[in-house]
């Protein structure tokens, strides 16, 4: 069994959060709390374990041309793109696009409606549906960017 897991990794993600004025914004964040350990008899690997808590996993398929006009995430949630592409636009006008293997943390609950915008809007990109896996956390939202656990 090899214990060479390479250098400590970091993993990028976009955090959609609410600032002190109630406006949704994106912040580029990194998962950096990786620790090298084995899971059972497997070789050591890098794990960045989140706080333990209740969660609901939701798989969703957004059809071609789907647009979710301004809305808030139903709960703080990790959103992982499984296939297809989609966009997310924050109230401050920042828009990101994601494809397979990319993920974000949606935590835009309790926004203040501004110019008809509240939360974010999102939709599919291209000529195929977008398949997502959402892990909705059963906890109150934070208003601090990059603090996800």
Image: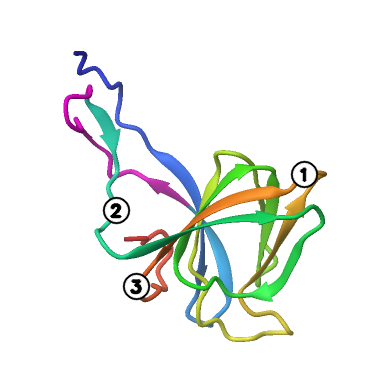
The image shows residue 90 at horizontal and vertical percentages of 64, 67
- Residue at the image point whose x is 77% and y is 44% from the top: 128
Badge 1 local density, few (<14 within 10 Å), some, or many (20+)?
A: some
Q: Is residue 138 above or below residue 104?
A: below
User: Closer to us: mark 1 or mark 3?
Assistant: 1
Q: Identify the disc placed on residue 139.
A: 3
Label 2 crowd (10 A; few <14 / some 14-19 / many >=20): few
Q: Quadrant of residue 124?
A: bottom right
What residue is pinned by disc 2? 50
Q: Residues within 10 Å of mark 3 (few under 14, many from 20)?
A: few
Q: Which residue is mark 1?
A: 128
- First to last magenta residue range: 29-43
Within the magenta stretch, is there residue 39?
Answer: yes
User: 143 or 3, which is in the foreground?
Assistant: 3
Residue 6, magenta (yes or no): no
Query: Pointers 1 and 2 in contact (CB under 8 A)?
Result: no
Q: Is residue 91 above or below residue 52?
A: below
Q: Secondary structure at mark 1?
A: loop
């Amino acid at each position: 069994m090899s214990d060479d897991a390479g250098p400590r990794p970091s993993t990028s993600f976009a955090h959609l959060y609410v600032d002190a004025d109630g406006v949704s914004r994106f912040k580029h964040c990194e998962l950096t709390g990786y620790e090298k350990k084995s899971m059972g008899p497997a070789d050591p690997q890098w794990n960045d374990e989140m706080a333990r808590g209740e969660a609901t996993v939701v798989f969703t398929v957004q059809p071609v041309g789907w647009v979710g006009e301004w809305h808030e995430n139903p709960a703080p949630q990790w959103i992982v793109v499984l296939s297809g592409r989609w966009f997310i636009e924050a109230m401050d006008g920042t828009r990101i696009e994601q494809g397979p293997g990319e993920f974000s943390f949606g935590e835009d609950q309790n926004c203040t409606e501004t110019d008809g915008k509240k939360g974010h809007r999102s939709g599919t990109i291209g000529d195929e549906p977008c398949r997502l896996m959402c892990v909705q956390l059963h906890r109150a939202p934070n208003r601090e960017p990059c603090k996800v656990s």
